[in-house]
Image (cartoon, grey):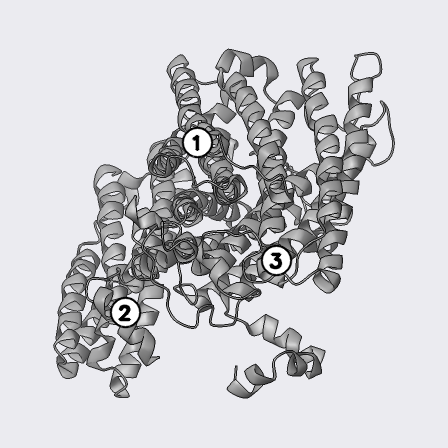
């Protein structure tokens, strides 16, 4: 940007034609713009994935419903799962990471800005490819459009015999392409955090968000790559006539399951560790205390990272393994609860004795703590292989992992939105509307996912498009679907709040939360160059040191 | 600008961070290793599971010349990088060109081997599980060699145009890490496919 346009400021910004301003967003390599692009992309996909979920819940509201056909229902659960994991949660988390990491470590951009842009556009292109299947999936007339093989696409369902047309090809290519984008982002995160820190910020003084994203980046490198490899194999099978997962030629369908879940379980932790990172930044600020047990938090996350690579086959207890396999994966799945529990105690320890301020970001984080605990408890139940033989593939499992992904991850994402919205936009959100969002979504979440456990225990399997009356499932399905509408109302309040605040919100100033990390030392929104002079830090809370020169942190760390 | 330089002089001396090029490349290599690991696991898992012939024992021959070429190219690229670090651009160009030649020889060797397998032995990627896993694993490696050779060729052109200077030593070294990785993968593929699997 030339100095002239900087001097003119907002006047020249609004005077320039809209086409030129949009073009700048397309060609940008600035980490803040790319972060916002990631986040907006994820929000749009969240609405699409939410509509798909709503369609499924309307279909299941009463027995023998005919809202959609079984074929459409299959497409909806496949697209919902694939969209929410790969094109909602991952882009939003990558977006916050891309936006915040350089600001928090006192750098002016990521290590590889152009790779950053490439990664975003690969992810965006992957999502477009997935949704293009609605138009282009009809390989043969009537062969069906969108993918309908489930989000884990077990073989041999993905073979040409059972997936005619191109729908499965769109699915596999979308994940292949977006996987390359994810690996690029992870390379960038790791290189940025290790090589771009400002003077004084040793590894032990990094904000926890940077630490947790570093671990997440390492996990993406090691977990998304197997998925990419498995998708290449599926492409070889489907395009070149290979036999990797072709049981008639001696191939193994179970090998696909192993390859998928070697990716699939670490993926859960890839999603939840950045959520932990948000909680670890928000809870201290709204408790007015430094984080409790910083080194233990880092160590516990590293532990989770390691152990998460040895738990994958707990998704396969019902497939049938040796007793040694069952024992091993039961034990490892329970062991991972230990570092996770340590983290929960650390957050509680941070709140203990603090001056807790229940503004919207904190509300979401407190709800996250309790909901994540319950999700962990049902997780331990399902990790017990005999229990899983009974409840595997039932609605109990669906309720469990939605408790993690919605109750923990999405809650902290909402918290992060409210916490960093003033930094990104320069304006405050409306606190009253945010409270409406919280309580509507809270009621909706618990109506839907608390009661979803029960039909699972009563034997309702996942992925059925309708059910017989008289099994005792009707009332629970009705309550579950009613909850969805509360959640929609909550999300509407959220989106409305963002849009309203963007135009009408109060000016936020640099540091509306009286927070302690470096992103709050620069203006809101930050200038293109982030920091006019490279900051120098001496402790984990550089802004505390600045505000309290008589009692700085570095004397005690 | 001057004020912040003054402010930083005290800490500047000891504040050294790792090179982002090297970290980025090592991270990429970790990701690539994970991809290759999955293909290697699939190859091992499917050894001897083909329901029809031909088998590796019947058709595979040791690619001795190609292997010697590829492994020695690791040495020549190392010598090239060292020459560039010492600002000897001429020596760099020579070693870089030899690396290009050795890598190309390896790739041609793989091509000839595949032609022999397809047309003389009737083994394609759809013949049996061995064909599927063999062409995928060796092909994935050959793809990485091809990408590397394209980069080497591009650098060669830039060298001939006189654009490569001693200050590019760091970048050449970062690239050479990739090339060494491709070599290490070949050692594993060679051992698995042509020694153990045969």
Residue at (74% x, 58% y) in the render: A499
Q: In this rendering, does residue A444 appear at all?
A: yes
Quickly name the residue at label 3: A422
> Which residue corresponds to mark 2?
B8
Q: Nearer the viewer, mark 2 or mark 1?
A: 2
Residue A413, how many percent across, how many down? 59, 45
Q: Chain of mark 3?
A: A
Q: Do tags 3 and 2 sit on the same chain? A: no
Disc 3 crowd, CA 10 A, few/some/many (<14, 14-19, 20+): many
Q: Quadrant of residue B9?
A: bottom left
User: What's the distance in space between the residues labelled 2 and 1, CA to CA?
Assistant: 35 Å
For label 1, the residue is A346
Task: Where is residue B115? Give x, y as percent.
Answer: 35, 58
Mark 1 near mark 3, Cβ–Cβ under 8 Å? no
Taking B52 as reference, is A87 above or below it?
A: below
SS at badge 3: helix
- Above or below residue A180? Residue A385 is above
């Amino acid at each position: 940007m030339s100095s002239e346009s900087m001097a003119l400021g907002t006047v020249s910004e609004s005077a320039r034609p809209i086409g030129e301003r949009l073009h700048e967003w397309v060609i940008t390599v600035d980490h803040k713009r790319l972060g916002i692009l990631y986040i907006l992309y994820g929000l749009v996909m969240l609405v699409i994935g939410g509509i798909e979920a709503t369609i499924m819940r309307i279909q299941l509201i009463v027995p023998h419903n005919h809202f959609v056909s079984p074929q459409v229902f299959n497409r909806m659960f496949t697209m919902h799962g694939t969209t929410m994991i790969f094109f909602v949660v991952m882009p939003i988390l990558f977006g916050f990471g891309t936006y915040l990491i350089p600001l928090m470590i006192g750098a002016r951009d990521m290590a590889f800005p152009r790779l950053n842009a490439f990664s975003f556009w690969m992810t965006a292109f992957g999502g477009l490819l997935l949704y293009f299947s609605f138009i282009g999936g009809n390989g043969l007339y009537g062969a069906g459009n969108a993918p309908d093989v489930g989000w884990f696409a077990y073989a041999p369902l993905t073979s040409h015999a059972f997936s005619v047309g191109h729908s499965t090809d769109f699915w596999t290519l979308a994940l292949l392409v977006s996987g390359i984008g994810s690996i690029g982002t992870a390379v960038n995160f790791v290189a940025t955090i290790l090589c771009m820190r400002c003077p004084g910020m040793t590894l032990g003084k990094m904000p926890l968000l940077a630490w947790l994203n570093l671990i997440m980046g390492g996990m993406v490198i090691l977990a998304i790559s197997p998925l990419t490899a498995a998708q290449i194999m599926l492409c070889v099978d489907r395009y070149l006539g290979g036999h990797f997962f072709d049981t008639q030629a001696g191939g193994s369908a179970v090998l696909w399951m192993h390859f998928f879940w070697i990716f699939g379980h670490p993926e859960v932790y890839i999603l939840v560790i950045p959520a932990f990172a948000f909680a670890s930044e928000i809870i201290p600020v709204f408790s007015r205390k430094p984080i409790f047990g910083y080194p233990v938090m880092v160590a516990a996350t590293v532990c989770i990272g390691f152990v998460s690579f040895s738990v994958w086959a707990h998704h396969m207890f019902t497939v049938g393994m040796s007793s040694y396999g069952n024992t091993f994966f039961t034990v490892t799945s329970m062991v991972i609860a230990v570092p996770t529990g340590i983290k929960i105690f650390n957050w509680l320890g941070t709140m203990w004795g603090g001056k807790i301020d229940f503004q919207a970001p904190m509300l979401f984080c407190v709800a996250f703590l309790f909901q994540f605990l319950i999700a962990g408890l049902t997780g331990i139940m399902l990790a017990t292989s005999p229990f899983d033989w009974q409840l595997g593939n039932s609605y109990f499992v669906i309720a469990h992992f939605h408790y993690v992904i919605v109750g923990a991850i999405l809650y902290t994402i909402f918290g992060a939105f409210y916490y960093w919205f003033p930094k990104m936009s320069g304006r405050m959100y409306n606190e009253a509307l945010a409270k409406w969002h919280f309580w509507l979504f809270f009621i909706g979440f618990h109506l839907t996912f608390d009661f979803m456990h029960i039909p699972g225990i009563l034997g309702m399997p996942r992925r059925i498009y309708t059910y017989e009356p008289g099994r005792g499932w009707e009332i629970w399905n009705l309550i579950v679907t009613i909850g969805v509408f509360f959640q929609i109302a909550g999300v509407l309040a959220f989106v409305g709040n963002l849009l309203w605040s963007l135009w009408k919100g109060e000016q936020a100033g640099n540091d509306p939360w009286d927070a302690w990390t470096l992103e709050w030392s620069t203006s809101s929104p930050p200038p293109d160059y982030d920091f006019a002079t490279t900051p120098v830090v001496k402790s984990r809370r550089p802004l505390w040191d600045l505000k309290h020169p008589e009692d700085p942190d570095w004397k005690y760390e | 600008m001057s004020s912040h330089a003054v402010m930083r002089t005290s800490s500047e001396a000891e504040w050294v961070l790792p090179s982002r090029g090297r970290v980025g490349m090592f991270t990429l290599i970790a990701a690539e290793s994970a991809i290759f690991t999955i293909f290697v696991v699939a190859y091992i898992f499917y050894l001897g599971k083909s329901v029809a012939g031909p088998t590796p024992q019947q058709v595979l021959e040791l690619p001795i010349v190609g292997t010697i070429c590829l492994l020695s190219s690791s040495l020549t690229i190392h010598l090239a990088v060292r020459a560039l670090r010492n600002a000897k651009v001429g020596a760099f160009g020579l070693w870089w060109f030899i690396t290009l030649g050795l890598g190309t020889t390896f790739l041609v060797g793989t091509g000839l081997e595949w032609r022999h397998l397809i047309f003389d032995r009737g083994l394609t990627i759809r013949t049996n599980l061995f064909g599927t896993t063999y062409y995928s694993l060796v092909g994935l490696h050959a793809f990485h060699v091809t990408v590397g050779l394209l980069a080497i060729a591009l650098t060669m052109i830039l060298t001939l145009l006189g654009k490569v200077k001693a200050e590019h030593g760091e970048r050449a070294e970062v690239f050479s890490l990739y090339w060494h990785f491709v070599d290490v993968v070949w050692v594993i593929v060679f051992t698995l496919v042509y020694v153990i699997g045969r």
